[in-house]
Image (tube, rainbow, N blue to C red):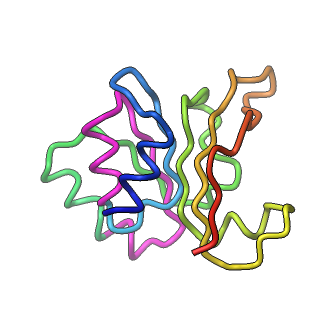
Amino acid sequence: PYIIGKMIALADINETDKVLEIGTGSGYQTAVLASMAKDVYSIEIRRDLLDRAAPILKNLKLAVHLRLGDGYLGWPEKAPFDAVIAVFPWFQRYYTGGIKKSEIIAIQKMNKKREDGYQKIMDIIYASKN
């Protein structure tokens, strides 16, 4: 809960934001985001985790959009996003800044949607080795 709270605080999420979460996991962070943001889109690469989180989020009557898949390309048809929040080993595979630990916390502020449908990361606000 502490790290999730810190990440959300650093991302400066508000009630008008559209947020992309990469790594739904248990759905806990997704639920917190859904209580704060206008729209939450969450991608999970592991079916077992998504299958466990989806009914919980539905029972809570939270308006979240879930997708099974690799978050590398994000969710381009729903872009632009005001913020992207990710906690996962995936980040290490694509990040070239030399972080060596497998668990990365990254909060990225995004710019407007580009003509090709993708967004450019403006800034990684916080990246930390666990």
| 128 drawn magenta | no
Residue 98 screen position, x and y as percent: 85, 69
| 44 drawn magenta | yes
Q: Residue at x 33, y 24 (%)?
A: 15
Residue 34 screen position, x and y as percent: 30, 40
Q: Residue at x 69, y 55 (%)?
A: 72
Vertical order, 38 against 7 (above or below): above
Q: As rendered, which of 10 and 28 lies closer to the eye?
A: 10
Is residue 119 found left or right of 61 in the rendered image?
right
Is residue 23 found left or right of 57 in the rendered image?
right
Residue 37 screen position, x and y as percent: 35, 32
Vertical order, 113 against 57 (above or below): above
Quadrant that contains the C terminus: bottom right
Residue 52 screen position, x and y as percent: 29, 70
* Location of residue 89 by image quarter: bottom right
Q: As rendered, which of 81 and 78 lies closer to the eye?
A: 81
Q: Residue at x 85, y 61 (%)?
A: 97
Vertical order, 59 against 122 (above or below): below
Q: Residue at x 73, y 28 (%)?
A: 117
Question: Which region is colored magenta?
Answer: 28-51
